[in-house]
Image (cartoon, grey):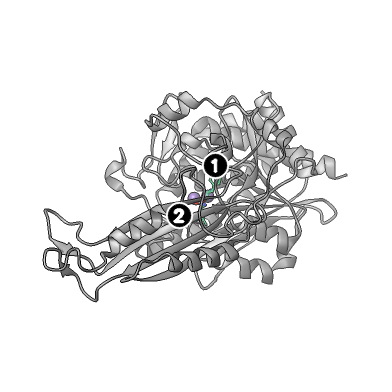
């Protein structure tokens, strides 16, 4: 065992206990009922950053949830790594589908995680992955091997669109000055197939409201004679895709980046087993845009999905009613060169245009952001690649992800530095779903790999 491995072996139980304590705090940013818990999570992390050896640890208040900052500056002449993460989590709903309560972490083994996984909301997204960085810093300071400067910026509004982070970044550029941004908030292909995320999709998230008659009506007396907003809404939504699952909004694909044959062939080399994919989701077929593979559909192609739809009577039994209103929440995942505000505008115009007579449509944009692609020839990417090669014994595969961290594109704009996405989660870890978990092996492997990133980044920067 090398000194990194010895330190982890000696402190493993405490590393787990500390994460478990953090996971007990229900820091759900979307639900105002949990606002105290969100603040508690920020306070708890402040203490942990100080314990790990950070100085100038400070909670910066915003108009929303606070941003936590801490740093360990050893020599201004050395490179600086800025670590970003988020302490807020998604709502755990539907709670009934959890095997154990979402904020009472339990350790269980699974087929994919024979060494055990921590089950709790936020285990992987993002408390577990963020905390790897706190423990990696503790380890490097304790072992006397920290090779460069480190800054932490941890927010509490990522899951609700990072509303106040942009202003914070814009007004604290000197504080946040760095040579590379490091984030663990994505995944990798498998524990035996390490990969580095080289792309994130952009996002446009909107809510639509369709209004018919001025009140709910008796569905016998009025049925057939006035437009039913739920019927209209579902027809409108259905028309947003054609028979090839291509999106029908005019101009939607205008700036979409097209990958070359070679780039697509390179992507196609990433290991992917369709049968295992279908089996893991209990589906008998995959679905999507004609002409693209599953991996392409969920990374280099834009999409449109209904995330929620409601209206009318959904209680027990039956109520014969034509509702006055129908609603849906719709997300569009975007790819490089698509501007999220332009797409939001095009969606709004189109959705209003296709409304049938007899209903009115309101579109409310929620949040969004630009996609991101990071080059594989940067010092940051090379350092990350070498770090994985060292601890996994295999060179990681570059892979674009379908998820979004909208603030990443903004970091590059405001701070002029690249982001390296070193994710240690797996798609099967059920982030945003019931029974979210994070493998103990992954957690410890992350803590082991991160110090090598610092080492190689510092060496390659010379
Ligand atoms: N950590 C995720 C994003 C992610 C997960 C990217 C896995 C790649 C792989 C992040 O917390 C998240 O959930 N982002 C949201 C967007 C945000 C604006 C709410 C998303 O992708 O839905
Ligand atoms: Mn996340
Ligand atoms: Mn998330």
Residue marked by disc 2: 240
For this orientation, the residue located farthest to the right is 462
Q: Is residue 162 in view from this perspective?
A: no
Residue at figure coordinates x 40%, y 49% from the top left: 24
Q: Is residue 71 left or right of residue 87?
A: right
Q: Picture coordinates of residue 386 (x, y %)?
A: 74, 33
| 108 relative to 346, above or below | above
Name the image quarter holding residue 413. Answer: bottom right
Residue 419 vs residue 290, the one in the foreground: 290
Q: Earlier in the sequence, mark 2 or mark 1?
A: 2
| 177 relative to 139, above or below | below
Residue 178 vs residue 245, the one in the foreground: 245
Residue marked by disc 1: 298
Q: Picture coordinates of residue 115 (x, y %)?
A: 47, 25
Residue at figure coordinates x 80%, y 41% from the top left: 377
Q: CA distance from mark 2 to mark 1?
A: 18 Å
Q: Picture coordinates of residue 15 (x, y %)?
A: 52, 39
């Amino acid at each position: 065992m090398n000194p990194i491995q010895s330190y982890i072996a000696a402190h493993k139980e405490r590393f787990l206990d500390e994460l478990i304590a953090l996971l007990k705090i229900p820091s759900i940013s979307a639900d105002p009922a949990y606002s105290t818990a969100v603040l508690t999570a920020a306070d708890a992390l402040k203490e942990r950053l100080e314990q790990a050896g950070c100085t100038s640890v400070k909670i910066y208040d915003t108009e929303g949830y606070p941003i936590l900052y801490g740093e360990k500056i050893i020599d201004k002449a050395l490179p600086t790594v800025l670590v970003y993460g988020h302490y807020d989590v998604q709502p755990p709903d539907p709670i009934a589908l959890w095997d154990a309560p979402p904020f009472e972490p339990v350790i269980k083994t699974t087929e994919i995680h024979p060494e055990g996984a921590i089950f709790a909301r936020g285990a992987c997204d993002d408390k577990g992955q963020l905390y790897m960085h706190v423990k990696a810093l503790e380890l490097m300071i304790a072992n006397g091997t920290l090779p460069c400067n480190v800054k932490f910026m941890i927010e509490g509004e990522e899951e609700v669109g990072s509303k106040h982070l942009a202003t914070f970044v814009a007004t604290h550029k000197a504080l946040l000055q760095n040579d590379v941004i490091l984030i663990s908030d994505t995944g990798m292909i498998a524990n035996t197939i390490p990969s580095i995320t080289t792309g994130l999709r952009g996002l446009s998230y909107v809510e639509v409201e369709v209004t018919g008659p001025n009140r709910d009506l008796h569905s016998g007396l009025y049925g057939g004679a006035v437009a039913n907003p739920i019927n209209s809404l579902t027809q409108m939504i259905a028309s947003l895709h054609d028979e090839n699952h291509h999106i029908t909004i005019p101009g939607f694909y205008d700036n979409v980046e097209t990958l070359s044959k070679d780039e697509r062939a390179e992507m196609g080399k990433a290991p992917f087993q369709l049968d295992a994919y279908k089996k893991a989701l209990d589906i008998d077929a995959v679905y999507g845009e004609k002409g693209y593979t599953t991996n392409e559909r969920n990374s280099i192609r834009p999409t449109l999905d209904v995330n929620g739809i409601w209206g009318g009577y959904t209680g027990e039994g039956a109520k014969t009613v034509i509702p006055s209103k129908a609603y849906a929440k719709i997300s569009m995942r975007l790819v490089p060169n698509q501007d999220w505000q332009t797409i939001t505008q095009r969606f709004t115009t189109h959705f209003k245009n296709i409304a049938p007579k007899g209903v009115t449509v309101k579109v409310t944009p929620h949040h969004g952001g630009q996609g991101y692609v990071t080059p594989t020839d940067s010092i940051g990417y090379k350092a990350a690649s070498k770090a994985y090669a060292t601890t996994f014994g295999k060179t990681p595969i570059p892979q674009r992800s379908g998820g979004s961290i909208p603030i990443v594109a903004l970091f590059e704009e405001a701070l002029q530095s690249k982001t390296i996405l070193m994710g240690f989660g797996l798609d099967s870890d059920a982030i945003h779903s019931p029974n979210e978990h994070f493998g103990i092996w992954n957690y410890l492997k992350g803590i082991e790999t991160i110090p090598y990133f610092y080492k190689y980044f510092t060496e390659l920067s010379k």
